[in-house]
Image (cartoon, grey):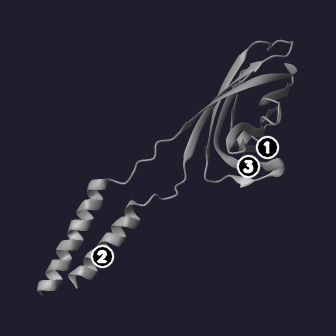
């Protein structure tokens, strides 16, 4: 009886310690440097976004898409949030992040494809139209691991319960 209980506890502990596929929130930031002649030429605008890297789904051309969970962007004196986007996805190609596929009413983020780098395009009333270069920084969110001490305590409690049953 005790042997069977110990085997069951060992098996349960093995499952508890096995790696578990978890969603991994990825936080990102970007800089847009306008490279088109005009009032914004040479200016840099920054923003941030996040996505869950476990939600990528296949798209066209071998790219994969994950919906943005958050988005913030200050551009030409205007603040844009996730709700201001017509669509917004993080994109990866061949397993690597390649940029954002996102658009608001007056701007678009285009992911890198083939030999072309990720880019930005805009058309703002009063400012004009143009393009920009993008740079991204990704930082996976820290996901706490299960506490090993708690697993050991659970195992010891199970062994104690098994001993009580064997005596009684």
Query: Badge 3: how crowded within 10 Å, few (<14), some, or many (20+)?
Result: many
Q: CA distance from mark 1 to mark 2?
A: 55 Å
Percent from the top left, x then y, of residue 45? 69, 21
Residue 97 seen in render: yes
Q: Nearer the viewer, residue 42 or 153?
A: 153
- The residue sitting at 79% across, 52% down in the picture is 59
According to the picture, the residue beneath numbered tag 1 turns out to be: 86
Percent of width and height locating residue 19 = 46, 57
Taking 27 as reference, is 2 above or below it? below
Closer to the eye: label 3 or 1: 3
Q: Nearer the viewer, mark 1 or mark 2?
A: 2
**Residue 126 seen from this side:** no
- Give the residue at x 12% y 87%: 168
In the image, taking residue 9 as reference, residue 75 lies left or right, namely: right
Mark 3 or 1, nearer chain start? 3
Q: Which residue is mark 3?
A: 64
Residue 163 position by quadrant: bottom left
Q: Which label's residue is closer to the chain start, 1 or 2? A: 2
Task: Name the quadrant containing residue 149.
Answer: bottom left
Q: Earlier in the sequence, mark 3 or mark 2?
A: 2
Q: Residue at x 71, y 21 (%)?
A: 77
CA distance for labels 3 and 1: 19 Å
Which image quadrant: the N terminus?
bottom left
In this rendering, position of residue 16 left or right of residue 82: left
Nearer to us in this view, 49 or 154: 154
Quarter-of-image position of residue 34: top right
């Amino acid at each position: 009886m005790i042997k069977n209980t110990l085997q069951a506890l060992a098996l349960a502990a093995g499952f508890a310690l096995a790696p578990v596929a978890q969603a991994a929130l990825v936080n990102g930031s970007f800089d847009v440097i306008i490279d088109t002649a005009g009032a914004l030429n040479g200016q840099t605008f920054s923003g941030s976004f996040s996505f869950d890297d476990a939600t990528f789904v296949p798209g066209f051309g071998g790219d994969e898409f994950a919906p943005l969970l958050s988005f913030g962007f200050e551009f030409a004196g205007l603040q844009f949030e996730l709700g201001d986007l017509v669509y917004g996805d993080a994109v990866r190609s061949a397993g690597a992040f390649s940029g954002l596929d996102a658009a608001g009413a007056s701007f678009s983020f285009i992911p890198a494809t083939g030999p072309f780098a990720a880019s930005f395009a805009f058309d703002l009333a009063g400012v004009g139209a143009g393009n920009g270069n993008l740079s991204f920084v990704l930082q996976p969110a820290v996901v706490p691991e299960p506490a090993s001490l708690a697993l050991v305590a659970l195992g010891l409690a199970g062994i104690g319960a098994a001993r009580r049953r064997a005596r009684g």
